[in-house]
Image (cartoon, grey):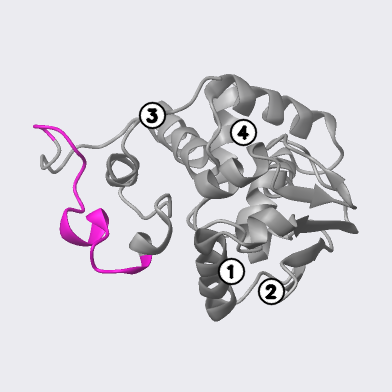
Amino acid sequence: MARNLDAKCRQCRREGEKLFLKGEKCFTDKCAIERRSYAPGQHGQKSGQRLSGYGQQLREKQKIRRIYGLLERQFRRTFAEAERRKGQTGENLLKLLEGRLDTVAFRMGFGASRAEARQVVRHNGILVNGKRVNIPSYNLRPGDVVQLTDAARGHLRTKAALEAAESRGFPEWLEVNSKEAKGVFKTYPVRAELPPTINEGLVVELYSR
């Protein structure tokens, strides 16, 4: 299976902001952005570079792909589905990305990062409405119940991730019971509940060229 093997901290530095790809490290002063906020590579510290309109659109698309851990073909398929649905394409795109099983598992604290939550899914550690699902891109529907299997609940990393997520609080569109490692995907998030640093409109412009 194809994967993005680029170093996580390099990806954040390339986008110039925290993408929260390395779990708890991103919340500490050990985060690469805290120490080196410039882009990686020998030309990373050059200042005064201005991106063209196309460059800005491309960078935003790459940033969103990296946040949600999708490869180019997966992202294009998701965008095509967002276009088919009623409503604004940009908002539909973010809703589809937030409705993925690996993203919901991460938001519920079943993994310290999206990559870790995706691994839990692939290793048969997640039940959806009582049935085992090991497809990270599985799209949840409002009302679906997501929980860890008994085996996955016993892992120390999973316990630590749940505790950390509970201390930070869970999104409004999820209902999570940390003690039972179980939650409900209540609804798709509205745009105001998602990070303002994401500009999905640029992605729509890019694919409309």
Write down the residue under mark 1: 162
User: What residue is rendered at 89% in x and 52% in y?
Assistant: 130
Quadrant housing residue 146: bottom right
Considering only order in the chain, which callout, 4 or 3, is on the residue closer to the N terminus? 3
Q: CA distance from mark 2 to mark 4?
A: 37 Å
User: What residue is rendered at 50% in x and 68% in y?
Assistant: 160
Closer to us: 195 or 72: 72
Element under disc 2: loop
Task: Classify residue 122 as left or right of residue 203.
Answer: right
Closer to us: 154 or 168: 154
Write down the residue under mark 4: 204
**Callout 4 crowding tier (Cα within 10 Å): few <14, some 14–19, many ≥20:** some
Considering only order in the chain, which callout, 4 or 1, is on the residue closer to the N terminus? 1
Foreground mark, 2 or 3?
A: 2
Foreground mark, 1 or 3?
A: 1
**Callout 1 crowding tier (Cα within 10 Å): few <14, some 14–19, many ≥20:** many
Foreground mark, 2 or 4?
A: 2
Element under disc 1: helix
Q: Are marks 2 and 3 in contact (CB under 8 Å)?
A: no
Considering only order in the chain, which callout, 3 or 1, is on the residue closer to the N terminus? 3
Residue 31, horizontal then vertical, whole percent = 27, 59
Amino acid type, residue under disc 3 in the picture? Leu
Question: What span is in magenta?
Answer: 27-43
Element under disc 3: loop
Element under disc 4: helix
Amino acid type, residue under disc 4 in the picture? Val
Rendered image: mark on residue 5: 3
**Callout 3 crowding tier (Cα within 10 Å): few <14, some 14–19, many ≥20:** few
Q: CA distance from mark 2 to mark 3?
A: 31 Å
User: What residue is rendered at 59% in x and 76% in y?
Assistant: 166
Residue 21, horizontal then vertical, whole percent = 42, 49
